[in-house]
Amino acid sequence: MAQSSYLYSLPACMLSLCVLVGTTSGQLSANFYASSCPNFSSIISSAVNSAISNEARMGASLLRLHFHDCFVNGCDASVLLDDTANFTGEKTAGPNNNSLRGFDVIDTIKSQLETSCPGVVSCADIVATAARDSVVALGGPSWNLVFGRRDSTTASLSAANSNIPAPTLNLSGLITSFSNQGFTTNEMVALSGSHTIGQARCTVFRARLYNENNINSSFAASLRSNCPSSGGDNNLSPLDVASPTSFDNAYFNNLLNQNGVLHSDQQLFNGGSTDAQVRTYGSNSATFLTDFANGMVKMSNLNPLTGSSGEVRTNCRRTN
Ligand code: HEM
Ligand SMILES: *[C@@H]1O[C@H](CO)[C@@H](O)[C@H](O)[C@H]1NC(C)=O
Ligand SMILES: *[C@@H]1O[C@H](CO)[C@@H](O)[C@H](O)[C@H]1NC(C)=O
Ligand SMILES: *[C@@H]1O[C@H](CO)[C@@H](O)[C@H](O)[C@H]1NC(C)=O
Ligand SMILES: *[C@@H]1O[C@H](CO)[C@@H](O)[C@H](O)[C@H]1NC(C)=O
Ligand SMILES: *[C@@H]1O[C@H](CO)[C@@H](O)[C@H](O)[C@H]1NC(C)=O
């Protein structure tokens, strides 16, 4: 739908449809499970809270799972499908292999939901809800989701490899990657604030420690102790050293001090067009949290399968 047709539909909205604005997106709706699975959201939030109390990092992992789902042909749980002898999923894509986590938590939630309301709640809706509840559990903002996403029967390794941004990208590469999914540069910067939680492996930031000069020297020295110039590929460091399990705006203040862990992180504050926004988020937490929540709503609505497309998987790891 072109932007301009929105203008023509405004009078209709004023007459009757305004109450729906903000609660529907395509065929998704806020009350999708109201009669078919009224407890779905409390089941998901309890399981997410319990997983995070076992391991705070799991909140970060569940947030990232949603991102890596949605950027690959929409939020359709394609990322959850296991490889089999005759099926290649997305789990071995470069950004996912030995990196993406949280599958067991999704399995636990799915099995609880299958007990309460068999065949009703999609894996894609579980992932979207778990990501939101994770951010809330770690002290971040909440947002209103709409539901009814259906699960794919396919996956795309090649789209996972090409659509998920790499930490080696420069600012223009990051802008392009997000623009390809319909996001503005401002939204890209807000969503990057996800790196206020979670961990990264030495292998994805080593080059920054040894080859780059836009890194704080004492910060680089502290990361090098756990990320030698060779070996230790899987050693972890927090993406936000200041507050690794709090969903706050510290990530942006880190960037002001050249304390970005990933090359791509520091690209957001490196003398380019996004510097001012990083400063704003660093000094105004509320602005960041609001923009982040709005960006997540938009991400959660990327290209869902609805109606009779796709299916509701009974096991998130395989098609029915
Ligand atoms: C802007 C472009 C982005 C790049 C280049 C990028 C790249 C990365 C990389 C390389 C890691 C470390 C993975 C590892 O070492 O195993 C990571 C972790 C993470 N990313 Fe991103 N990311 C980006 C945007 C996002 C977005 C938009 C979100 C969520 C909306 C997100 C959420 C996360 C989280 C929460 C973690 C930590 C995961 C954990 O601890 O399990 N990232 N990201
Ligand atoms: C639904 O959730 C409420 C509270 O969240 C709980 O009291 C009730 O037992 C749950 N019902 C079922 C069938 O799980
Ligand atoms: C893939 O293999 C399984 C058995 O491992 C079989 O049930 C299924 O029909 C096969 N699917 C296709 C598309 O060949
Ligand atoms: C994924 O990681 C495993 C090691 O756990 C490795 O053997 C395999 O080659 C990797 N796959 C790809 C496609 O990189
Ligand atoms: C960003 O990266 C692309 C691809 O690697 C390169 O062509 C481009 O020149 C880079 N832009 C800047 C400003 O460095
Ligand atoms: C380096 O980081 C420290 C704290 O992490 C900060 O106090 C200092 O100002 C930073 N230096 C630069 C040049 O940004």
Image: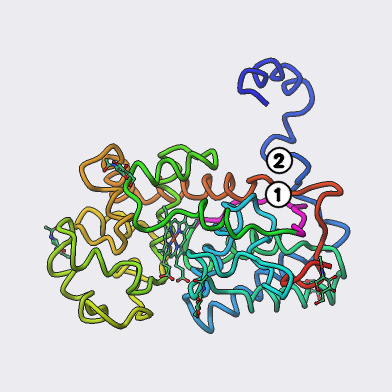
Binning the other alpha carbons within 10 Å of mark 1 as few (below 14), some (14 to 19) or many (20 upward) gives many
19 inside magenta stretch: no
Main SS category, magenta section: loop
State whether residue 44 is above or below residue 11.
below
The residue under the point 64% across, 23% down is 2
User: Does the beta carbon of the residue at mark 1 sit less than 8 Å from ligand 1?
Assistant: no
Where does residue 308 sit, x and y in percent of width and height?
A: 86, 49
The residue under the point 73% across, 41% down is 24
Q: Which residue is mark 2?
A: 25
Say which amino acid is labelled 2: Ser
70 with respect to 218 (left or right): right
The residue under the point 58% across, 79% down is 51
Say which amino acid is labelled 1: Val
State whether residue 175 is above or below residue 82.
above
Q: Which colouring convention does the figure follow?
A: rainbow
Q: Which residue is mark 1?
A: 146
Quadrant of the rendered image containing residue 16:
top right
Where does residue 63 sit, x and y in percent of width and height?
A: 53, 63
Range drawn in magenta: 141-153
Where does residue 26 sit, x and y in percent of width and height?
A: 74, 39
User: Callout 1: helix, strand or loop?
Assistant: loop
Q: CA distance from mark 2 to mark 1?
A: 7 Å
First in sequence, mark 2 or 1: give its number.
Answer: 2
Front residue of 167 and 195: 167
189 with respect to 208 (left or right): right
Front residue of 311 and 140: 311
The residue under the point 51% across, 40% down is 180
